[in-house]
């Protein structure tokens, strides 16, 4: 969405903070959000994958953010070049952006296949908790179409896709996958909330701004759904999106290695089989099943909860996923 002379990437709309602290970034239409399960309803307001993008026209610009629910981190990039890391907490945090003294040299060394134009400022918002956007100040202009990747990747899934346990906003596996592939990213991960609702399937199917997608399915409902419930959800979710995007690659990811595998929960493997079988049944040329263990191959890539990947696990997942996608799309 556009706000003044800045683009709010991966933000569908802004909601007023009930406490009056500013605006909350909502990643899906709010009328869809309120129909989702409680986890997705809440976590759609966490700005994973969201960025404030603009060109600096004056001497400086300032972004003020606030995080009432605890301290978190925002990153600033100039194109692909890292600039700064900022702690955002309950006190309004002013992030001042100035033109780098080394800008001319940066442009000289920017590779021809860079993802982002070096003149584009990107303030990458925290993946958690829900931050408040208080203000954007300064003389800025909107990004030009040629300043960002023209190929866009949409990632749907659980807290693992959302980025849980990532140290920095750009450390999630979808963010790193997009970086490795040279694409832009729409992150639709919802911690605890990937319940494969029909409304979410319809929303993703109806979007025309993405060129390939990953759908991570299973971990959030393996304890709460019956086998039949999961089959029906997967059937509608995958079929609806694949029908609407026959020319776009769609990668269906089943459950990553997790504690249920180590404690003998057979339903976990059954859920994996359902994802694989649905892809096989549909038999579409650009619909692909990816086993979770093809991305996360090492158990010590997990954190101590044996569900969420550690930062090293995220990096392993991103590199393996990027290899799989690259091989299919080329």
Image (tube, grey):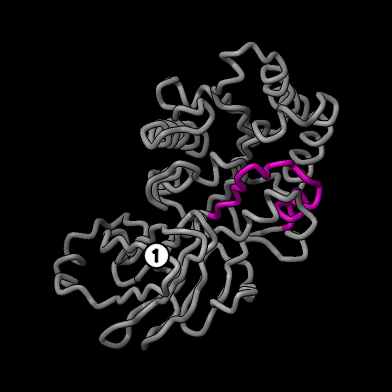
Mark 1, Cα crowd under 10 Å, few <14 / some 14-19 / many 20+, is many
Q: Nearer the viewer, residue 37 or 200?
A: 37
In percent of the image, x 45 and y 21: which residue is there? 297
Residue 157, placed above or below residue 317: below
Displayed quadrant of residue 81? bottom left
Residue 205 counted in the magenta span:
yes
In percent of the image, x 21 and y 67: which residue is there? 107
Residue hosting label 1: 88
Residue 62 left/right relative to 21:
left
Residue 239, placed above or below residue 95: above
The image position of residue 110, as x and y in percent, is 23, 60
Residue 306, placed above or below residue 86: above
Residue 54 counted in the magenta span:
no
The image position of residue 317, as x and y in percent, is 45, 32
What's the magenta region? 186-206
In percent of the image, x 51 and y 33: which residue is there? 308
Displayed quadrant of residue 193? top right
């Amino acid at each position: 969405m556009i706000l003044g002379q800045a683009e709010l990437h991966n933000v569908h709309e802004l909601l007023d903070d009930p406490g009056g602290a500013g605006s909350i970034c909502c990643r899906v239409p709010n009328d869809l959000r309120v129909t989702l399960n409680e986890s997705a309803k809440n976590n759609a307001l966490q700005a994973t994958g969201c960025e404030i993008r603009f060109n600096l026209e004056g001497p400086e610009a300032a972004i003020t953010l606030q995080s009432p629910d605890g301290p978190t981190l925002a990153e600033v990039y100039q194109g692909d070049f890292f600039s700064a890391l900022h702690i955002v907490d309950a006190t309004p945090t002013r992030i001042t952006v100035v033109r780098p003294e080394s800008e001319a040299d940066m442009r000289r060394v920017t590779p021809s296949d860079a993802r982002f134009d070096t003149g584009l400022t990107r303030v990458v918002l925290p993946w958690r908790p829900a931050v408040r956007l208080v203000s954007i100040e300064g003389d800025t202009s909107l990004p030009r179409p040629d300043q960002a990747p023209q190929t866009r990747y949409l990632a749907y899934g659980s807290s693992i896709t959302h980025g849980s346990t990532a140290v920095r906003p750009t450390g999630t596996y979808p963010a790193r996958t997009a970086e490795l592939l040279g694409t832009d990213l729409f992150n639709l991960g919802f911690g605890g909330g990937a319940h494969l609702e029909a409304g979410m399937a319809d929303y993703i199917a109806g979007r025309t701004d993405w060129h390939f997608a990953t759908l991570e399915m299973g971990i959030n409902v393996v304890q709460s759904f019956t086998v039949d419930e999961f089959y029906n959800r997967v059937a509608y979710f995958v079929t609806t999106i694949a029908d609407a995007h026959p020319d776009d690659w769609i990668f269906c990811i089943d459950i990553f290695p997790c504690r249920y595998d180590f404690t003998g929960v057979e339903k976990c493997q059954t859920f994996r089989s359902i994802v694989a079988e649905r892809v096989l049944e549909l038999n579409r040329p650009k619909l692909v099943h990816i086993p979770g263990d093809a991305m996360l191959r090492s158990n010590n890539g997990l954190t101590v909860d044996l569900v969420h990947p550690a930062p090293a696990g995220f990096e392993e997942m991103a590199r393996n996923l990027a290899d799989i996608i690259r091989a299919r799309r080329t």
